[in-house]
Image (cartoon, grey):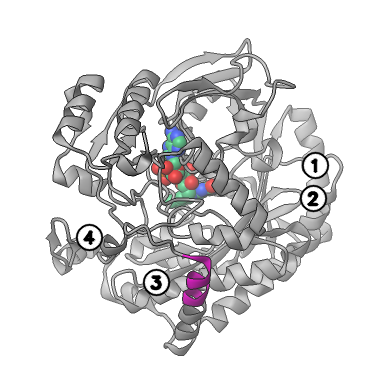
């Protein structure tokens, strides 16, 4: 059928078809429910509703691959948009609908371990399970899965694969896409494919489909199951080093990246601002979350057979001490490792706390630390801290974060720091990470024109009715079909940066600390606001 003749509307007839296909209990059109599914973790201002039809018509909760395929067939027949959703922790609007339609909620019912197989060193799971659940089950049997995001208690396997993210374990084992043996994927027309083999690698077997859907943010297919590689765990040994200034650690970072044998599971850093703000925001006194000894730290986590880990530990210590690092007690290293999913504790004060995520070549690490501080000062930011990690020997991820007022209109100008840092990263041969709905326009910035055209052609060919998460990745569209074009957004980004520099410095964190007492924070904030259904908090 010609795609122009498709209804694109979710009619009562489509709702009954969905109900008969996957069961009435798994199809929800309640207004409050739909409102909850209209955005991800990022706060979305009310005006967003003008640009995007972000409230879905219906939320479905499939239980298996066949259910997902049935939903997709109905959507395809009618040209209805389908948005896959994990646990909505990404923050770039990847699982936010742009043209309403159907949200497929993977985390509610497609969250089971299908098979944990030590014999074949693999684990097969449904896409909506969290990394924590998979990791816990594997560790109980003496195995780990290669890598996971620091949001692992909530992030789903499907969600992280969808973003092709970087995280804990990526330095040693690559991202989740590098650890996939097989997947069941539902295509836009509802057909189901397998991308590899459950018990053996997909070598010399045609196009590498195990990696093809990674980073597609759900625009090419709905991944329903993953078979992931498992690795024998051995010991996991966190070690931590203190530096007078964060940039002093540069020779150590370079030495690790260029070392022929050291392969830590994870290398991350945090500067003095991060620790100071964690302490200021802490509810307990003295804080159980912060060690006062920590100034500017580099955490190096080693993993494997104990004898090999001993050797690596010794070599890492030599490198760190040579760069002026001081080894902190094991208890602090263990604590910081345990804290790896709580980088944003300072948010407890009731502020917006936003990281500007960029990747740059590892050899510019030391200089880039300086760029982050300069950026905070030039853009009059309220500094949160500089945190980040080594992604692989070539690449480092910086996540300098800042505080912002996410309730006032002018607070939004703080986002210009992300644009600013993205521009700086580009000068170093790096770039911002992730597209989602808000940064889809950036695709033209980070690839050459031929490459972008090829990606757009692929999407058009593979999803001719544009039903699979439309308005994301290859075209940041508004509900009117007008694209957030590269030129327009570049202009807006420069304007925002100029305005931000003209405004007084931010002080939301400092103000909030005075305004809210920790024990009454939630009550006072609730009293401050009035919730109006469909219009959010006013
Ligand atoms: C405190 C904190 C720490 C974080 N740390 C990290 C980190 O270390 N590394 C990192 O990369 N990110 C990190 N993130 C971002 C985010 O948590 C990750 O991107 C996470 O993997 C998203 O998973 P999710 O289940 O919430 O996905 P969602 O946000 O629900 O979805 C993400 C994208 O994947 C698509 N998608 C979801 N499920 C499927 C599916 N089954 N098939 C096809 N497409 C699908 C969605 O449409 C969307 O485009 C962090 C976030 C927070 C709040």
- Disc 1 CB within 8 Å of nearest ligand 1 atom: no
Boundaries of the magenta span:
485-493
- Dots 1 and 2: beta carbons under 8 Å? yes
Residue 81, magenta (yes or no):
no
Left or right: 499 as drawn, with respect to 312: left
Label pair 2/3, CB-CB below 8 angstroms: no
**Mark 1–mark 4 CB contact (< 8 Å):** no
| Residue 404: mark in rendering | 3
In primary-sequence order, the first of circles 1 and 3 is: 1
Residue closest to the eye, 338 or 507: 507
The front one of 32 and 529 is 32
Per the image, label 1 sits on a secondary structure element best described as loop
Which mark identifies residue 256? 2
Query: What separation in Å lies between label 1 and label 4 (alpha carbons)?
Result: 46 Å
Above/below status of 233 relative to 87 = above
Farthest right residue? 260
Give how far apart the Cα atoms at labels 2 and 4 are: 44 Å
Viewer-side residue, 500 vs 508: 500
> Can you say whether 423 is above or below 435 in the image?
below
Taking 185 as reference, is 378 left or right?
right
Mark 4 residue element: helix
Q: Which residue is mark 4?
A: 522
Mark 2 lies on a secondary structure that is helix
According to the picture, the residue beneath numbered tag 1 turns out to be 262
Residue 242 drawn at (x, y percent): 68, 60
């Amino acid at each position: 059928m010609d795609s122009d003749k498709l209804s694109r509307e979710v009619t009562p007839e489509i709702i009954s078809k969905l109900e008969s296909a996957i069961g009435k209990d798994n199809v929800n059109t309640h207004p409050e429910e739909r409102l909850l599914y209209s955005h991800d973790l990022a706060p979305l201002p009310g005006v967003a509703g003008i640009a995007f039809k972000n409230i879905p018509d219906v939320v479905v909760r499939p239980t298996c691959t066949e259910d997902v395929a049935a939903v997709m067939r109905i959507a395809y027949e009618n040209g209805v948009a389908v948005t896959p959703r994990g646990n909505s922790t990404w923050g770039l609007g990847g699982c936010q609908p742009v043209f309403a339609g159907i949200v497929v909620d993977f985390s509610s019912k497609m969250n089971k371990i299908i098979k944990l197989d030590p014999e074949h060193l693999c684990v097969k799971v449904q896409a909506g399970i969290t990394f924590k659940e998979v990791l816990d089950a594997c560790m109980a049997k003496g195995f780990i899965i290669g890598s996971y995001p620091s949001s692992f208690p909530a992030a789903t396997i499907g969600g992280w694969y969808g973003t092709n993210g970087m995280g804990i374990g990526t330095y040693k084992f690559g991202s989740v896409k590098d650890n996939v043996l097989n997947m069941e994927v539902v295509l836009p027309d509802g057909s189901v494919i397998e991308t590899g083999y459950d018990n053996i690698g997909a070598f010399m077997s045609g196009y590498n489909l195990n990696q093809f859907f990674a980073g597609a943010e759900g625009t090419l297919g709905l991944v329903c199951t993953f078979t992931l590689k498992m690795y024998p765990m051995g010991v996991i040994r966190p070690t931590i080093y203190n530096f007078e200034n964060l940039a002093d650690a540069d020779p150590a970072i370079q030495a690790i990246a260029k070392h022929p044998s050291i392969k830590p599971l994870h290398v991350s850093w945090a500067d003095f601002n991060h620790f100071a703000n964690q302490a200021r925001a802490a509810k307990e006194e003295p804080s159980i979350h912060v060690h006062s000894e920590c100034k500017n730290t580099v955490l190096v986590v080693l993993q494997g057979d104990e004898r090999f880990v001993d050797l690596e530990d010794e070599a890492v210590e030599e490198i760190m001490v040579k760069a002026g690092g001081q080894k902190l007690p094991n208890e602090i290293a263990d604590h910081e490792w345990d804290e790896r999913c709580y980088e944003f504790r300072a948010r407890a004060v009731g502020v917006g706390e936003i990281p500007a995520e960029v990747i740059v070549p590892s050899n510019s690490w030391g200089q880039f630390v300086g760029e982050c501080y300069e950026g905070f000062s030039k853009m009059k930011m309220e500094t949160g801290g500089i945190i980040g990690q080594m992604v692989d020997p070539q690449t480092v991820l910086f996540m300098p974060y800042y505080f912002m007022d996410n309730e006032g209109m002018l607070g939004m100008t703080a986002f210009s720091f992300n644009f600013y840092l993205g521009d700086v990263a580009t000068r170093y041969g790096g770039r911002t990470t992730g597209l989602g709905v808000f940064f889809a326009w950036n695709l033209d910035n980070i690839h050459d024109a031929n490459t972008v055209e090829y990606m757009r052609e692929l999407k058009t060919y593979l999803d001719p009715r544009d039903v699979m998460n439309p308005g994301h990745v290859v075209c940041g569209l508004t509900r009117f079909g007008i694209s957030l074009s590269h030129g327009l957004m570049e202009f807006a980004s420069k304007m925002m940066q100029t305005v931000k520099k003209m405004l007084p410095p931010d002080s939301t964190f400092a103000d909030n600390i005075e305004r809210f007492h920790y024990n009454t924070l939630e009550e006072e904030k609730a009293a401050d606001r009035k919730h109006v259904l469909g219009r959010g908090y006013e």
